[in-house]
Image (cartoon, rainbow, N blue to C red):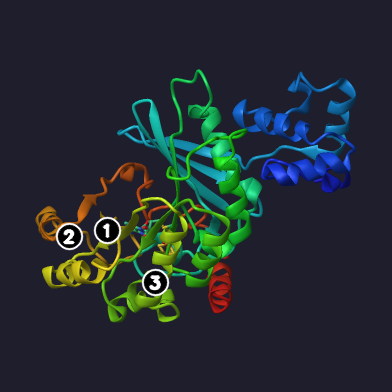
């Protein structure tokens, strides 16, 4: 990168207030920021010369000050069931993955927030690869920008749309707080993607202080990766539980939902791992535990991968677990495994995991990052 571009600012990840300030610094009216946001996110433009309602002088000023850059696509894979996975290059041999799950004209996009993850859940391929770095807001919203350009931006007159975004790709989103909040702000902004706060979901392993902090700045939907109904088991599956045990987590989730001021229901994710957390005793314990909170339960049969000895339970075991929860009055779904033929299913996203030389370094970084959680 030459020094001229070094001084330029990538405005892909700038929120409306941030853009307004940047435009003001260039002695431009703030409404220009709204126009720019529409060009970038609703029309998918990365070249200021295409912004035809800006004067030639303004376009040249923008060219001198800013640039618009998403991660570059290394390759794409299309699953037999229509699920599409992109591997994106974010520099320095780091790569991330994002997944688009279409259903007719609608689609859910699964977005990454970090390269790797420091939480190191015992069942997760992303966790096993260690942690490299946080993504910038431009790299997070850049995934939406790329996918929207390929599938359809939620804009007027489009018959194909990204209708839901889930922060469930690689990484722990609350461990990368500010860039994730900025990117979600752009997802919701009516001049950008205009999604409703119910259609943008943040999934977390349960960082309690950050959930509390999030409730002050956002009211997107929250999904909690619970995976166990007691601390003893959850400490093993989701190690961050040792720091923020279940009751503390549930109380912060209740506060979050109350702050949303609508009839919001929290989703609890529960991976079913054969003989580890899928017994009927644990289903009962789970039902008892969650009776204190209005919620849905999403069961995810464990997706197997090479580096893990855990196994996926039989369909019969999964059904029994589900039936018990339904009998206890819980809305319970089993997440269908989409895209597993291209390693795009939950927990199979690994980005640059095969780069053995950097693996040790990433695991070391994960240990350091985990100490700060
Ligand atoms: N770090 C956040 C978001 C990313 S993980 C979190 O943990 O919530 C996204 C989802 O995939 C989580 O629900 C996680 O528990 C699940 N997941 C991880 N590994 C999996 C695996 N091997 N099989 C099935 N689901 C998995
Ligand atoms: Fe990180 Fe989520 Fe994987 Fe746990 S499940 S290691 S928090 S990405």
Q: Secondary structure at mark 3?
A: helix
Residue 286: percent from left, percent from top = 22, 69
Give the residue drawn at x 36%, y 62%: 225
Whether residue 312 is visible: yes
In the rendered structure, the answer to whether residue 269 lies left or right of residue 49 reads: left
Tell me if residue 187 comes above or below residue 204 in the rendering: above
Q: Alpha-carbon neighbours of circle 3 within 10 Å: few (<14), some, or many (≥20)?
A: few
- Reading the chain from its start, which is encountered first: label 3 or label 2? 3
* Tags 2 and 1 touching, CB below 8 Å: yes
In the image, which is nearer the foreground, mark 1 or mark 3?
3
Image coordinates for residue 171, horizontal then vertical, percent: 50, 59
Disc number at residue 251?
A: 3
Nearer the N terminus, badge 2 or badge 1?
1
**Quarter of image, ligand 2:** bottom left
Q: Residues within 10 Å of mark 2 (few under 14, many from 20)?
A: some
Provide the residue designation for mark 2: 313
Q: Residue at x 32, y 75 (%)?
A: 234
Q: Which residue is mark 1?
A: 302
Q: Earlier in the sequence, mark 1 or mark 3?
A: 3
- Residue pushed farthest front? 261
| Helix, strand or loop for disc 2 | loop
Q: Nearer the viewer, residue 280 or 358?
A: 280
Label 1 C-beta lies within 8 Å of the nearest ligand 1 atom: yes
Q: CA distance from mark 1 to mark 3?
A: 27 Å
**SS at badge 1:** loop
Instruction: List x then y, in percent, for residue 74.
Output: 56, 40
Task: Report how many numbered discs are placed on residues in the image.
Answer: 3
What residue sits 58% from the left and 76% below the top? Answer: 372
Residue 278, x across and y down, in percent = 18, 66
Residue 308 in the image: above or below residue 241? above
Q: Is residue 359 visible?
A: no
Picture quadrant where residue 67 is located: top right
């Amino acid at each position: 990168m030459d020094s001229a571009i070094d001084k330029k600012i990538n405005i892909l990840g700038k929120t409306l207030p941030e853009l307004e300030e940047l435009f003001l610094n260039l002695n431009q009216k703030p409404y220009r920021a709204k126009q720019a946001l529409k060009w970038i996110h609703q029309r998918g433009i990365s070249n200021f010369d295409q912004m035809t309602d800006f004067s030639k002088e303004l376009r040249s000023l923008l060219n001198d000050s800013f640039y618009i850059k998403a991660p570059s696509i290394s390759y794409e894979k299309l699953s037999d069931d229509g699920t599409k996975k992109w591997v994106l290059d974010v520099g320095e041999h780091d790569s991330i993955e994002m997944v688009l799950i279409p259903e007719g004209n609608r689609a859910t996009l699964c977005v990454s927030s970090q390269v790797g993850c420091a939480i190191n859940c015992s069942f997760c391929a992303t966790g096993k690869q260690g942690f490299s770095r946080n993504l910038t807001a431009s790299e997070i919203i850049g995934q939406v920008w790329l996918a929207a350009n390929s599938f359809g931006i939620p804009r007027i007159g489009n018959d194909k749309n990204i209708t839901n975004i889930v922060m469930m790709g690689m990484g722990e989103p609350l461990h990368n707080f500010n860039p994730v909040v900025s990117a979600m702000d752009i997802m919701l902004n009516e001049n950008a993607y205009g999604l409703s706060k119910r259609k943008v979901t943040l999934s977390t392993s349960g960082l309690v202080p950050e959930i509390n902090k999030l409730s002050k700045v956002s009211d997107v939907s929250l999904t909690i990766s619970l995976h166990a109904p007691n601390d003893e088991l959850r400490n093993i599956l989701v190690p961050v539980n040792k720091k923020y045990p279940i009751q503390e987590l549930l109380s912060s989730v209740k506060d979050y939902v109350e702050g949303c001021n609508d009839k919001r229901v929290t989703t609890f994710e529960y991976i079913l791992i054969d003989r580890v957390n899928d017994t009927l005793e644990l289903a009962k314990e789970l039902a008892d535990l969650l009776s204190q909170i209005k919620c849905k339960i999403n069961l995810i049969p464990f997706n197997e991968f090479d580096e893990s000895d855990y196994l996926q339970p039989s369909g019969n075991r999964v059904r029994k677990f589900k039936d018990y929860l339904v009998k206890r009055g819980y809305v319970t779904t089993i997440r269908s495994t989409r895209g597993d033929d291209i390693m795009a299913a939950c927990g199979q996203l690994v980005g640059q995991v095969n780069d053995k030389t950097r693996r040790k370094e990433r695991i070391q970084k994960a240990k350091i990052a985990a100490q700060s959680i």
